[in-house]
Image (tube, helix red, strand yellow):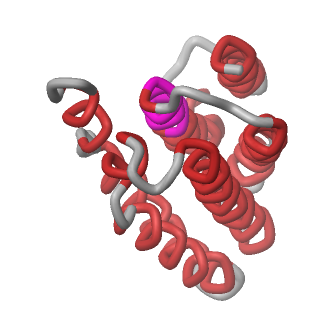
């Protein structure tokens, strides 16, 4: 499951970078139209990297998977696989309301899918497992999801404010979440 997921994430990042258009002129002015797509690519690269990192750690804390876990993982990968599409749409249309809201909706649904995957793993692992102890209440995850719930409709009226909220969530997760690493380093972990 981990190797398959890693491969899908690598393809997602590759597809995103291939969507970037190279300017045909060797001037700084030629870069101006590609700035929005570059910015959306950078934000999406960070998001995909955050999901990959957290997914990797969560799977290392788990000891078993089930059919439900496999389906929950595919559910997450489905939403992550839409990030290149919404990234390109938002960047090419210079952060217009509908593409910006669509980008946030995909982030929201990926967030929900990650929560479902974590709960599916916890159902297999049990409430006293090291994974359960490592995940705790997952305040960062719940807070991020709440921000997306606000940002998506906001994008329809104030796209730049929604972008700020998307960046905020990314910054929250750039601060490493060491809960799982600490649990794995404990004696018996």
Q: Quadrant of the C terminus?
A: top left
| Residue at x-position 67% and y-position 57% | 116
56 with respect to 136 (left or right): right
In the image, is residue 109 part of the stretch drawn in magenta? no
64 with respect to 181 (left or right): right
Can residue 7 be seen here? The reply is: yes
How far from the left and from the top, in percent, is residue 85?
Answer: 82, 42
How far from the left and from the top, in percent, is residue 153?
Answer: 68, 85
Magenta part of the chain: 51-60
75 with respect to 32 (left or right): right
How far from the left and from the top, in percent, is residue 111?
Answer: 61, 58
Q: In which quarter of the image is residue 65?
A: top right
| Residue at x-position 47% and y-position 35% | 58
Is 56 or 168 nearer to us in this picture?
A: 56
Work out whether 163 lies above or below 133: below
| Residue at x-position 70% and y-position 23% | 5
């Amino acid at each position: 499951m981990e190797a398959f997921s890693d491969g899908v994430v690598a393809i997602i990042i590759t597809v995103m970078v291939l969507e970037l258009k190279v300017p045909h002129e060797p001037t700084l002015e030629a870069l101006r139209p590609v700035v929005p797509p570059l910015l959306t690519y950078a934000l999406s690269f960070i998001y995909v990297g955050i999901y990959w990192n957290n997914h990797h750690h969560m799977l290392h804390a788990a000891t078993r998977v089930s059919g439900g876990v496999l389906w929950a993982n595919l559910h997450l990968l489905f939403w992550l696989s839409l990030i290149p599409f919404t990234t390109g749409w938002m960047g090419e249309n210079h952060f217009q309301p509908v593409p910006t809201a669509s980008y946030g909706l995909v982030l929201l649904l990926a967030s929900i899918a990650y929560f479902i995957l974590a709960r599916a793993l916890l159902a297999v692992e049990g409430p006293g497992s090291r994974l359960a102890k490592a995940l705790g209440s997952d305040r960062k995850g719940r807070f991020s999801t709440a921000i997306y719930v606000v940002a998506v409709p906001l994008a329809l009226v104030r796209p730049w404010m929604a972008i700020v909220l998307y960046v905020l969530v990314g910054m929250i997760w750039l601060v490493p979440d060491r809960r799982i690493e600490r649990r794995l380093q404990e004696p018996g972990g």
